[in-house]
Amino acid sequence: MKASFCALASLLLAASSVSARTVFSAIQVDGVELGHGVAVRVPSANAPVTDITSKNLICNSGFVQPVSDVVASVPAGGVVAAEFHHTSAGYVGPDPADPLDPTNKGPVLAYLAAVPDATQEDVTGLKWFKIFEQGLNPQTHQWASDLLFINEGYVNITIPSCVKAGQYLLRVESISLSSASQYPGAEFFMSCAQIEVTGGGHASPETVSFPGAYTATDPGIVTNIYAVETYTPPGPAVFEC
Ligand SMILES: *[C@@H]1O[C@H](CO)[C@@H](O)[C@H](O)[C@H]1NC(C)=O
């Protein structure tokens, strides 16, 4: 009896994790909204990437066509607000799972990679550095995903003031850890925005590759969120000027 109840409970858990789905589909630059899909490569499906060795972990796949050819100008030190919603359509009205199902918990991370041309299709072999991470606040017990829900899908990301001027892809990622007690289990939701940093400095941050930056044994990826008090997001340290 008990065993079958547990089986049912885990089925229900698995079912609820399906609605974790979320899509990063728009940006604001220093408070100015660019518009849905402008300067962002928006995946048409809101399904997660679960294989950390997949090329799709870089900037996702199956984009809404046509992909924006806009490259958003951002002053170094400026703020890009990434906007997540339940589906690739963006905000379409009240939805209890917008921007994501609030029962799904996890971090939000952002990375930059310098590119010759931010509209280039090929995203393999890029060198990424992390500029933002939010995990679990041990005082408030709030996850980054809780803040994303409270803030209606917006998360503010500051572009470090010392990065070199030029074109970049900005990869913003929400991870759902609701089924992450083993690998695979964590669900990765990401898109890439196309930006041009102006001003800036001469920083040469240490970089990582996607895929490659995440491992199947990283405690930021394999974690039982129902048992942890503290949490360290996966990947490298956040670059600071
Ligand atoms: C982002 O920053 C702007 C400007 O400081 C602020 O008004 C807004 O509330 C912030 N949004 C979030 C989600 O923190």
Image (cartoon, helix red, strand yellow):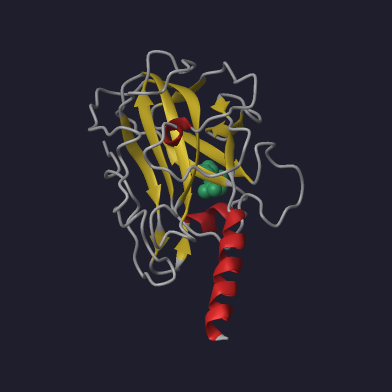
Q: Quadrant of residue 157?
A: top left
Q: Residue at x 40, y 66 (%)?
A: 224
Q: Residue furthest right?
A: 93
Q: Looking at the picture, how far across and down is residue 80, in whole percent?
A: 49, 34
Q: Quadrant of residue 124?
A: top left
Q: Looking at the picture, how far across and down is residue 71, in whole percent?
A: 52, 19
Q: Residue at x 58, y 80 (%)?
A: 5
Q: Quadrant for the C terminus, please.
A: top left
Q: Looking at the picture, how far across and down is residue 194, in whole percent?
A: 49, 23
Q: Is residue 26 above or below residue 11?
A: above
Is 122 left or right of 206, judged from the image as shown?
A: right
Q: Is residue 218 above or below residue 44?
A: below
Is 68 left or right of 94, judged from the image as shown?
A: left
Q: Residue at x 41, y 44 (%)?
A: 109
Please state which of residues 115 and 241 is positioned toward the viewer in this rendering.
115
Q: Quadrant of residue 76?
A: top left
Q: Quadrant for the N terminus, please.
A: bottom right
Q: Is residue 75 above or below residue 134?
A: above
Please state which of residues 9 and 105 is positioned toward the viewer in this rendering.
9
Q: Residue at x 36, y 57 (%)?
A: 222
Number of marks present in the image shown:
0
Q: Looking at the picture, how far across and down is residue 99, in whole percent?
A: 62, 49
Please state which of residues 20 and 84 is positioned toward the viewer in this rendering.
20
Please state which of residues 209 and 154 is positioned toward the viewer in this rendering.
209
